[in-house]
Image (cartoon, rainbow, N blue to C red):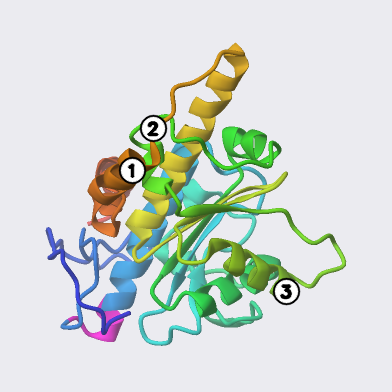
Amino acid sequence: MSQRATSFSTLTTGATSSHPGAPARVTSSILLTASDDLARQRAILKERLVLGLRILHKHGFEYHVSPRITVRDPGDPNTFWVHPIGLAFKLVTSTDLMLVDRDGNYLGGGGDRCRKINVTACKVDYPVFTARPDITTICHIHSTHGMAFSALGRHLDMLTQESAVFFEEHNLYAGSGELVSKSQEGREVAEALGKGKAVIQHNHGLMTVGTTIDSALAWAIVLDKECQVQLLTLSTGLSTVKIPPEDAALLRSLGGTEEDGVRKAAIYFQEAEAEYFSESYRKGYP
């Protein structure tokens, strides 16, 4: 990841707190750059992941223990950072995040190693990372509208300009039953994903991917909203006006790039940052 060219520069840089329990505000950078040393890249990445988890919480996507954001480590793309299972997203700090391998084995990090790692999720996500070396982030949610729509076993209709960001870039995964290994499930999900940005998993939920935490999170929020839109239109029993394929393709090119995903996520990260760091201030951290 550190070798990738970036099209966004660092926005602002703040001082890192010397208080051992305080959130370490290192930057509000959107993307990492090759000029940053590895320690700084990890610090930036982990801070962004913490904020991303808070955004999932804010949107009501924290349902049971399966929702997650997993992010490749900038030093070793075969390992990734995850939050400890059982810890509320709003309470996660960068020191709680854990570095794991393809099988969910603990490699480092974690303020409290008594908390568990979602090993099952790691075994599903790793084959997706392997199949898509271009992505850094996987976001998986069990949103109400996403789960409801997933039970229909159908693709999104192109009903709005926002839905067009998924035109020919989302697919369905029906699953292979409980007898299949989680690694095999991950390979099947990766196959369903292809070169796209999202998978609707039947009777389960939504998975999105991106080259940044920001874009993967943006696609999850947009996909959930578009599932809600289609459910509402279906509930009327009336016919719908769909965007023609050629128009949908154009709209995707105008609003469905990774850079567009970063821009869509910006307002959510602004709010999350303001809340996260004001909390540390109220607690008396310098």
Q: Is residue 192 magenta?
A: no
Magenta span:
36-40
Work out whether residue 112 or residue 118 is closer to the camera in this orientation and state it: 118
Label 1 Cα neighbours within 10 Å, binned few <14 / some 14-19 / many ≥20:
few
Q: Quadrant of the N terminus?
A: bottom left
At 49% from the left and 42% from the top, the residue drawn is 57
Mark 1: which amino acid?
A: Glu
Mark 2: which amino acid?
A: Ile
Label for residue 243? Answer: 2
Q: What secondary structure is the stretch in magenta mostly built from?
A: helix
Quadrant of the rendered image containing residue 189:
bottom right
Q: Is residue 264 above or below residue 215?
A: above
Mark 3: which amino acid?
A: Gln
Does the image show residue 86? yes
Question: What is the C-alpha distance between the residues marked 3 and 1?
Answer: 36 Å
Label for residue 13? Answer: none
Going from N to C along the chain, the mark reached first, 3 or 1, is 3
Which is in the foreground here, disc 3 or disc 2?
2
Label for residue 184? Answer: 3
Quadrant of the rendered image containing residue 173:
bottom right
Q: Is residue 195 left or right of residue 253?
A: right
At 38% from the left and 35% from the top, the residue drawn is 244
Q: What SS does tag 3 mark? A: helix
Which is in the foreground here, disc 1 or disc 2?
1
Label for residue 246? Answer: 1
